[in-house]
Image (cartoon, helix red, strand yellow):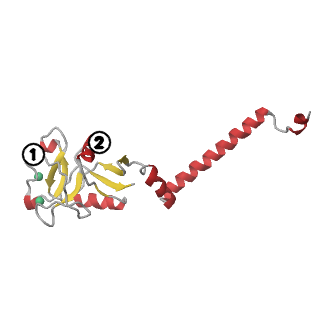
Amino acid sequence: MFSKRYTFIQPNEKMVFIFVFFVVLLTSCNLSLAEQKRNGSSWWRTVTKYWGCPNGWKSFSGHCYLFVYKRITWMNAGIECHNRGGYLVQVDNSHEERWLTSQLKDEVWLGMNDIQNEGHWRWSDNSFVSYTNWRYSEPNGGRSENCGCYCKNTCYWSSFNWNDRPCSYLTTGYVCEKKK
Ligand SMILES: [Ca+2]
Ligand SMILES: [Ca+2]
């Protein structure tokens, strides 16, 4: 008797109400997330730091990687990575090298150079290059080739290895890296 007096929404109406409530809730959350991503807010940066990488970047071992395929010089590739909050890819060990080469679709710049001191290769953060995966007979360019690049077809090789190129060479892309 009481239940009849106090029930002002019938079961079917309750379900419709709950459904509409959740649709509104999910839509507003989605809009809010999209807004945060667009604005690059600190809240969104915190989320991507611990949960993943920005759109278009791939995640590996605590870092994010962006693969860009276009004709570009080493210097301009570095500038584009910097503008995206990262740096030209730095390969620290064989584990990272295996993953990178499994992802590559074309020849891309590496973040290393021997511009300042011939034969002494350094990464963008000025640290020495310790792990290497030079192709047989590379590096071979002396003072005329001071920037590191992946090569495969242009080295007549079946897999991706490292080659020194003139920094002004227009290779087919680059990889940016950044920490999560
Ligand atoms: Ca050189
Ligand atoms: Ca070379």
Q: Residue at x 65, y 42 (%)?
A: 23
Going by the image, does 78 lie left or right of 32? left
The disc placed on residue 16 is none
The answer to which quarter of the image holds residue 122 is bottom left
> Which kind of residue does numbered mark 1 sit on?
Tyr
Residue 4's place in the image compared with 112, above or below, is above
Task: Give the crowd class for mark 2: few <14, some 14-19, many >=20 residues within 10 Å.
Answer: few
Residue carrying label 1? 136
| Label 2 with label 1: CB-CB less than 8 Å | no
Determine the CA span between mark 2 and mark 1: 22 Å
Q: Residue at x 8, y 59 (%)?
A: 142
Q: Is mark 1 within 8 Å of ligand 2?
A: no
The x and y percentages for residue 51 are 46, 49
Which one is in front, 44 or 1?
1
Q: Earlier in the sequence, mark 2 or mark 1?
A: 2
The x and y percentages for residue 102 are 27, 40
Q: How many marks?
A: 2
> Which kind of residue does numbered mark 2 sit on?
Gln
Q: Residue at x 38, y 49 (%)?
A: 57
The x and y percentages for residue 87 are 30, 59
The x and y percentages for residue 46 are 47, 57
Badge 1 marks a residue whose secondary structure is loop
The answer to which quarter of the image holds residue 164 is bottom left
The disc placed on residue 103 is 2
Badge 2 marks a residue whose secondary structure is helix
Task: Give the crowd class for mark 1: few <14, some 14-19, many >=20 residues within 10 Å.
Answer: few
The C terminus, quarter of image = bottom left
